[in-house]
């Protein structure tokens, strides 16, 4: 699975990303979640600047805490929170056991993906919280793919 996760990060890159892109991507994610009856919180940041945040009915402040913890992992490691956790699982251990990072501050669980600019690297994050971790990750990846495909066809 790790090669697939790395491929996603290579494929799902932006030429540019701004406030309008955050709005469009965020509303796309919320729309997908609504269609499927998912109770999730969606968060998009450019650096430290939160550009989009929406909590669907059925979520709580706990989802915001998970988002913050996942974002810290992506910022520290430069990769999706699911890839970071999977890298530890591939080694036969867990992020919590071997990273030596406070689990109250860091969560290598799926759902946070770096916003990567081609030629620049990670500049922000898009995060979903509320589903099992693989489902959070897949929802973000699906939305990124749909969004980037729509930008290419413009």
Image (cartoon, rainbow, N blue to C red):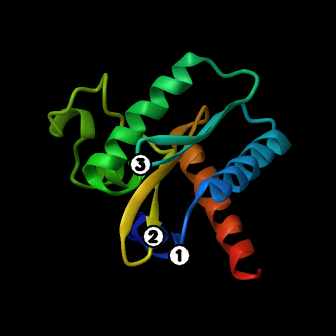
In which quadrant is the N terminus drawn?
bottom left
Element at badge 3? Answer: loop
Residue at mark 1: 15
Left or right placement of residue 90 versus residue 18 in this view: left
> Which of the labelled discs sits on residue 117, or is there none?
2
Distance from disc 3 to disc 1, alpha carbons, whole Å, reads 16 Å
**Residue 108, visible in the rendered structure:** no
Classify mark 3: residues with Cα within 10 Å, few (<14), some (14-19) or many (20+): few
Camera-side residue: 25 or 132?
A: 25
In percent of the image, x 75 and y 52: which residue is there? 28
Element at badge 1? Answer: loop
Distance from disc 2 to disc 3, alpha carbons, whole Å, reads 12 Å
Residue at mark 3: 47
Q: In terms of sequence position, does the residue under pointer 3 or pointer 1 come before the other? A: 1
Q: In terms of sequence position, does the residue under pointer 2 or pointer 3 come before the other? A: 3
Q: In terms of sequence position, does the residue under pointer 1 or pointer 2 come before the other? A: 1
């Amino acid at each position: 699975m790790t090669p697939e996760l790395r491929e996603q990060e290579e494929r799902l890159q932006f030429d540019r990303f701004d406030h309008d892109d955050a709005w469009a991507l965020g509303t796309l994610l919320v729309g997908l979640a609504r269609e499927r009856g998912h109770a999730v919180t969606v968060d998009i940041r450019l650096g430290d600047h939160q550009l989009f945040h929406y909590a669907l009915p059925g979520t709580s402040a706990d989802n915001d805490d998970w988002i913050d913890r996942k974002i810290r992992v992506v910022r520290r490691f430069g990769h999706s929170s699911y890839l970071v956790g999977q890298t530890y699982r591939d080694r036969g251990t867990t992020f919590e056991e071997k990273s030596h990072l406070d689990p109250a501050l860091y969560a290598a669980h799926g759902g946070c993906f770096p916003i990567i600019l081609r030629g620049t690297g990670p500049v922000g994050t898009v995060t979903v919280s509320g589903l099992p971790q693989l489902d959070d990750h897949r929802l973000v990846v699906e939305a990124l793919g749909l969004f980037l495909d729509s930008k290419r066809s413009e």
